[in-house]
Image (tube, rainbow, N blue to C red):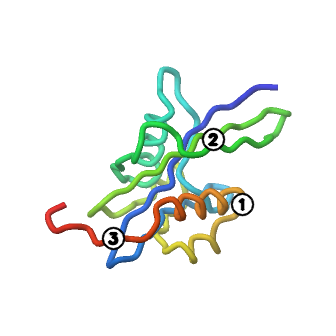
Amino acid sequence: MALIESAGAVLYTEDGGVRQYVLVMEKNGSFGLPKGHVEPGETLAETALREVWEETGICAILHTMQPVMVDEYPIAGGDVKRVSWFVAHYHDQTPLADPTQVLDVRVLPLREALRLLTYGSTRAILREVDRRLGDVRPRPKNF
């Protein structure tokens, strides 16, 4: 049994006082959050930022260099996948799916994002991050 390390981000922006989350449609048609395998020599935070960039074209800002949650689950062949989740945000950028990575990128308010996510564990992560982020505050001008 091997442990497969991955990292990803709950990526959001705020528009008109509404927090919106970025979802990606994987090549298998499932909707999730940007994530991927850790490459040799990479930190988990670097992996999360790289995967966000590769899958969405967004240059994100991490809230902290430490993961806020870790999810482990069995995968094919008896291996275990561990995903370290970070929280990241962005401003004034338009996500664009890289077709070599994902089929689609969507930016949605929480309720719609929760409906679209394929896996219950991912919905739980998104709900918890949204709870921790709290109420949306207007962004100051020139920020």
* Sequence-wise first label, 1 or 2: 2
- Type of amino acid under label 1: Tyr
Disc 2 marks which residue?
83
Q: Amino acid at mark 3?
A: Arg
Determine whether the residue tagged by mark 2 lies in a helix, strand or loop: strand
> x, y (%) of residue 68?
54, 45
**First reached walking from the N terminus: tag 2 or tag 3:** 2
Above or below — where is 47 with respect to 39?
below
Q: In the image, which disc is placed on residue 137? A: 3
Q: Quadrant of residue 124?
A: bottom right
- Say which element carries label 3: loop
Which of the two discs, 1 and 3, labels the residue nearer the N terminus?
1
In the picture, measured across the screen, residue 63 lies left or right of residue 125, that is: left
Q: Residue at x 65, y 57 (%)?
A: 122
Residue at the far right in the pictured view: 78
* Above or below, 100 relative to 1: below
Question: Quick one: label 1, few (<14), some, or many (20+) residues within 10 Å?
Answer: few
Residue 64: image location, x then y, percent: 41, 42
| Residue at point 36%, 53% (across, down) | 58
**Residue that mark 1 sits on:** 119
Occupied quadrant, residue 70: top right
Amino acid type, label 2: Val
For the residues labelled 1 and 2, the Cα–Cα distance comes to 14 Å
Marks 1 and 3, how far apart in space? 29 Å
Q: Are marks 1 and 2 in contact (CB under 8 Å)?
A: no
